[in-house]
Every structure is written in C-alpha cells, then in structure tokens.
Image (tube, rainbow, N blue to C red):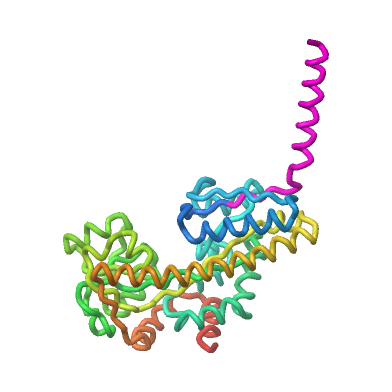
C-alpha cells in the first residue's frame, strides 16, 4: 500500500512537471464582439492556429468571442490596463487618435480599391502611428467592412430622389449632418426599433451594410437596395504595445506573420460573403439600384468637411487626392 502511494505520488509529480513543461511562455487573451459564425471570428481562429503552430507552443492564444471580455471599449480599456491583450476595433479608436475618425467618414473613399490603396499606404501608416502613440495599441491587421447602402421602397438614383425621405440613422452626428445635406430627414434611432418603424411607416428608409440588411430581414419591409456605398470603412485587429514588446523578437515576428495570414484569410472570406449576401437578398426579392455616386459625394462633402477638425480635414483631402 505504501509503495503504491509513493508510486502514485511520483507519477502525479511527473504529470505536473510535464504539464508545466508544456505551458506556453506567453498567453494572449483575444476578446471581440463577433459571434463564432462571423468571419472576424473565423479569422481570429486562423490567427490562433498560426501563432500556436509557428511558435512551437510558446504562445497560447485564448479567444473570447461574443463580448465575453466586455464591449469594445471595455476590452480596449482592459488591454491598456494589462488584463486583456487583443481585440478587433474600429472608429472607436478616435477617442484616442482623432485620425481614426476617417475610418467611417462618409464618401471618403470612391470604392473598395481606393480604400485598399489608402489603408495599405502612407495614409494607413499615419493613422496606425497615431493609434500606437496615443492609445498604446499596435494595429496588426485590418479588415474591410461591408459598405453601407440605403434601402427604401422607391428606387433612389440621385440625391434629388431623397426629397425629405424619413431615414433612420445611428446616433452619429456626422451621419445626421450628411443625410440632411443630401436632402433627407434623418432620424437617429436604436437599431432594435428599425424593423417595426419601417413596418409602421414611421420611417421610410434605413442604411446599413448588406450583412445587417440580411440578418435583420429588412427585405420583408424594403424593396430596394440603393448602392450608395456612402460609408466604406475598415476595422483593426490590435494588440497592447506593452504586451507585444514584452516578447522576444522571434515571437514578435511570429505574431506579425500570423497577422498577415489572418488578414489575407479574412479578405477571401469577406469577398465571398459580400457576393453571397447580394445573391441572397436578390433571391428574397430585393432589387439593387445603381446610383449617381458622384452626385451623392459632391453634395455630401461640404457637410462632412464641416464636421471634421483641421487635422482630419487634411487627411480627408489627402485621401481624395489618391
């Protein structure tokens, strides 16, 4: 009996030692707001796989989707305090870095190619540098977001077609000012109220990316998707600067290489999803309408520039010149 107990103790000690040997040198807590089916989470899974494989287990990535670590701003604050390490975030970064406001400025970008040129070039570097300097966060990768389009029950091809259209917008002053300048009657409203308000004709239109148009079943209360593309934006995957710099250079390189792979993987998923969403909405009966984008952009621009500060306006103009 004594021999058996001693043997058991020795085996138990060996198992603990073995587990300790397998423990990662660094753990990354990666929290975000998307659910497990979302392509952002699928990209995060790809990042985890790449990091853990290429670091030989020296880095463990723990994923926390569905706001398990809190809302977007909560996770950013946790990263700055050192209790979380990574997240996916967008224009909220302007709370620290004003240049990040350009991540959601109406008609900053003509199309997807224009956005890619800006974000992948010197303008993107300028925004990222300010985020790192002022928020102590290092952007590792960026994901394009689906452009926001206007839905309605009458086709809208030109700003003149708006003519007092009662339009729901999120409670963002820049969005309100832009749609007023375009001739609509924007009404800030919680997203949860939009479907019923459209159904009851309290509002006549709303604007959102195709993903939300589909998931909210707006096809049941709206006939047209007018391809205004008025907001083209992107979102960053960020890591705490202090956490990143606490790692040796070889592991930092693993992080950056995995981030590149994650970004490419998400871009492929995004392109497939945008194509699928359009096909799905057309099958549900929605008609897609090409609009005079230049007319919309020209009429909106004075209101957008008025809402931006001098630093932001300079960046907006630099984007236009690309």
Q: Position of residue 274 (x, y in %)?
A: 41, 71
Q: Is residue 63 left or right of residue 255?
A: left
Q: Is residue 233 left or right of residue 79?
A: left
Rendered position, 36 above or below 152: above
Q: Position of residue 192 (x, y in %)?
A: 31, 54
- Quadrant where the C terminus lies? bottom right
Magenta stretch: includes residue 60: no
Query: Residue 126 lies in what quarter of the image?
Result: bottom right
Residue reaching furthest top? Answer: 1
Marks counted in the figure total: 0
Query: Residue 190 lies in what quarter of the image?
Result: bottom left
Q: Residue at x 75, y 37 (%)?
A: 19
**Residue nearer the viewer, 156 or 169:** 156
Magenta stretch: includes residue 2: yes
Q: Is residue 164 left or right of residue 275?
A: left
Residues rendered magenta in the picture:
1-30
Q: Residue at x 51, y 73 (%)?
A: 102
Q: Position of residue 73 (x, y in %)?
A: 52, 54
**Residue nearer the viewer, 126 or 273:** 273
Q: Residue at x 51, y 62 (%)?
A: 92
Considering the whole magenta stretch, tell me its main secondary structure. Answer: helix
Q: Position of residue 205 (x, y in %)?
A: 25, 69
**Residue nearer the viewer, 61 or 8:** 8
């Amino acid at each position: 009996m004594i021999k058996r107990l001693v043997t058991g103790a020795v085996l138990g000690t060996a198992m603990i030692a073995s587990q300790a040997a397998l423990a990662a040198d660094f753990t990354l807590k990666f929290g975000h707001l998307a659910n497990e089916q979302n392509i952002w989470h699928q990209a995060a899974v790809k990042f985890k796989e790449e990091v853990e494989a290429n670091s030989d287990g020296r880095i463990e990535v723990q994923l926390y989707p569905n706001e398990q670590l809190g809302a977007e701003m909560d996770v950013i604050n946790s990263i700055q305090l050192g209790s979380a390490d990574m997240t996916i975030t967008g224009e909220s970064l302007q709370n620290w870095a004003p240049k990040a406001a350009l991540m959601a400025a109406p008609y900053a970008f003509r199309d997807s190619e224009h956005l890619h040129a800006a974000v992948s070039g010197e303008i993107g570097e300028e925004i990222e540098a300010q985020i790192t300097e002022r928020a102590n966060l290092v952007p590792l990768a960026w994901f394009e977001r689906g452009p926001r389009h206007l839905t309605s029950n009458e086709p809208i091809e030109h700003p003149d077609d708006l003519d007092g259209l009662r339009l729901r917008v999120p409670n963002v002053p820049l969005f309100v000012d832009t749609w007023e300048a375009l001739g609509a009657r924007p009404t800030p409203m919680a997203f949860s109220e939009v479907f019923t308000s459209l159904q009851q004709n309290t509002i006549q239109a709303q604007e959102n990316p195709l993903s939300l148009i589909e998931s909210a079943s707006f096809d049941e209360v709206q006939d047209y998707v007018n391809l205004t593309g008025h907001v083209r934006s992107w979102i960053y995957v960020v890591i705490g600067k202090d956490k990143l710099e606490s790692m040796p250079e070889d592991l930092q390189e693993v992080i950056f290489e995995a981030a590149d792979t994650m970004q490419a993987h998400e871009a492929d998923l995004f392109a497939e999803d945008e194509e699928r969403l359009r096909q799905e909405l057309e099958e549900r009966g929605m008609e897609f309408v090409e609009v005079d984008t230049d007319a919309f952009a020209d009429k909106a621009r004075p209101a957008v520039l008025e809402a931006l500060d001098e630093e932001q306006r300079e960046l907006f103009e630099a984007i236009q010149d690309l």
